[in-house]
Amino acid sequence: MWLLYWRRLRIAAGGQIIITGVALELNITAIPSGMTFFNLALYNVTPPSAYVDNAAWDLGSGDRASFLGIFNMGTPVDLGSTCYVETNGINKPITLASATLYGYLITPTVYTPAANSEVYVPTLHAVGV
């Protein structure tokens, strides 16, 4: 799980934003076998499920109240020293419970990232409402 802080938007608890796009930078030099696409599941509080790395993701009954939606980020492309994928035009309105947004980066295929050796940098593009 990773955290996104909305300091630049200065959104207060209960504030609203519109997510316009998501991007994922993978600090790896080639696309590994089995890596096809990523999903990004967002929450307005720390997800009660508290999954550990490489656990199977599930939208459990305890997570439903904090779940904000899931986005298909697409298939990364190899740009030499970095792999990258970006999706724009999402335009999903959400209401924050705090100034922090939480999420799980999910690989729905058989690909399993190497523990602690691959850095993935998700970025959300949003505007305040």
Image: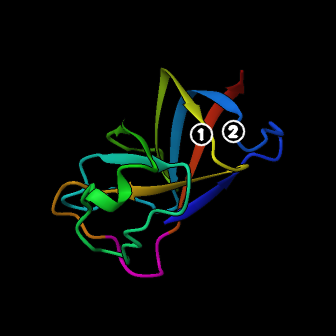
**Looking at the image, what colour scheme do you see?**
rainbow
Q: Which amino acid is tagged 1?
A: Leu
Q: Nearer the viewer, residue 62 or 111?
A: 62
- Nearer to us in this view, 106 or 95: 95
Q: Is residue 78 above or below residue 56?
A: above
Most frequent secondary structure within the magenta stretch:
loop
Residue 24 against residue 31 in the figure, above or below: above
Q: Is residue 42 magenta?
A: no
Give percent across and percent down for residue 63: 37, 57
Q: Residue under circle 2?
A: 14
Residue found at x 69% / y 38% = 14
Q: Residues within 10 Å of mark 1 (few under 14, many from 20)?
A: some
In the rendered view of the protein, which quadrant contains the C terminus?
Answer: top right
Magenta-highlighted residues: 113-118
Circles 2 and 1, Cβ within 8 Å, touching? The answer is no
The kind of residue tagged 2 is Gly
Q: Looking at this view, is 55 or 98 the one in front? A: 98
> Residue 107 location, x and y as percent?
28, 56
Mark 2 and mark 1 lie on one chain; the one further toward the N terminus is 2
Q: Is residue 14 above or below residue 99?
A: above
Q: CA distance from mark 2 to mark 1?
A: 18 Å
Horizontal relation, residue 111 to residue 15: left or right: left
On whether residue 114 falls in the magenta region, the answer is yes
Q: State the residue at coordinates (59%, 39%).
A: 124
User: Which residue: 36% across, 77% down?
Assistant: 114
Q: Residue at x 55, y 63 (%)?
A: 2
Compared across the picture, whether 83 is left or right of 51 comes to right
